[in-house]
Image (cartoon, rainbow, N blue to C red):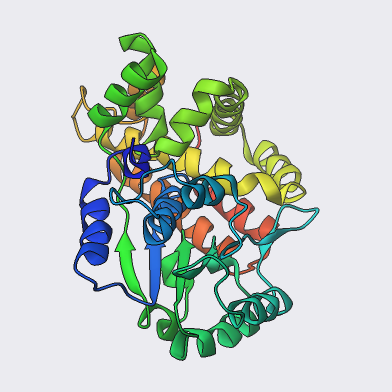
Amino acid sequence: MSAWDHIIGHDWAVDLLANAITNGRIGHAYLFTGAAQVGKTTLATAFAMALNCTETNKPCGACRSCRLIEAGRHPDVTVLNPTISARGKATLKIDEIRTLQRQLQLAVYEGPYKIAIITDFDAATVSAANAFLKTLEEPPKNVILMLTATQADALLDTIKSRCRVVNMRPVATPRLIDHLQTAHQLPTAEATTLAQIANGRPGWAIAAVADSALLEERTALLTMLTDALAGNRVTRFKLAEKLAKQPETLTNLLNIWLTWWRDLLVLANGQTAAVVTNLDYQTELEKLAGNWSAAAILRSLNQTSSAQWQLTRNANTRLVLENLLLTYPFP
């Protein structure tokens, strides 16, 4: 089985990268963008396997090179992940970039390419990004750089302009359902619910199959939201204070809340059969959609998205959360 077969629902991206190898038009730098767990790092890893594969059917997934890359032990392939602080903040620092740059100056050991996969490059500090820019401008011979980013607009334009950008879109729900049924033997109803919740993210869906805690966490975060919506200003200020002390939870929390408001907006506009994510909460969503105007729901949706943007730019966490919760409609 080719390593490309592990990529779920991004056939166009696989074709793009495979053709680049076949036609000898390989770029020196690639930027894979898209939502968390949509498959960015999986695609980058498969591409690295294809580039250094020793067999004809690249990437074969079985040769020594492919197996070493998949296991994270290939001497010519480095994966650099941001450092996660005790408060859950991901940061890619200049010292880590400089260490990587020194490694990339070394000759290939097994070849033909020395490859660096840098995940979540949007977590790079300004100094780290600027330091890496020199490598993008003048890459060492036989070096291929692969960056992934969730918030592509947070990257320097000079970084993006020097990469071939692969924008990875959410995977269609029917494709996810099919994968969960065939590869994980889930019943149709369970596969459908899980695929809807995944919202186009194969990585999340596959992780949820193995770890029920992900679904439990989602339930807890949606319960937190519905409790806040039923509460008064004091209740919401207390929640903002509590959440501000748990910054590591906010990315996932806001992503889940955003899907809630999107579903509500769909229902508020009369599309009663079109809940796209939280299918298992449809009855509750329909009730709430009847209580509030479409304008109020849209305002809540936009403010949730704005809060995500503000928190990636180091805004005051508590103030962002207070403003968010006070924007949400009251009973």
Q: Residue furthest right?
A: 86
The answer, for residue 278, to whether it is visible in the render is no
Task: Please give left or right for residue 275 compared with residue 77 in the image.
Answer: left
Which residue sits at x=61%, y=81%? 126
Q: Position of residue 308 (x, y in %)?
A: 52, 56
Give above or below for 23 relative to 230. below
Q: What residue is rendered at 46% in x and 58% in y? A: 150
Q: Residue at x 64, y 41 (%)?
A: 233
> Where is the N terminus found, in terms of image quarters?
top left
Q: Position of residue 197 (x, y in %)?
A: 41, 29
Is residue 164 visible to us here?
A: yes
Q: Position of residue 330 (x, y in %)?
A: 50, 36
The number of numbered badges drawn on the structure is: 0
Of 283 and 174, the residue lying toward us: 174
Of residue 156 and residue 111, the one placed in the foreground of this image is 111
Q: Which residue lies at the image location 72% right of the left edge and 52% below the top edge? A: 88
Residue 295 sits above or below residue 186 on the image: below
Q: Percent x, y for residue 73?
A: 62, 52
Residue 273, compared with residue 232, is above or below; it is above
Which of these two is toward me, 259 or 157? Answer: 157
71 with respect to 149 (left or right): right
Horizontal placement of 87 versus 316: left or right? right
Note whether 81 is above or below 175 in the view shown.
below
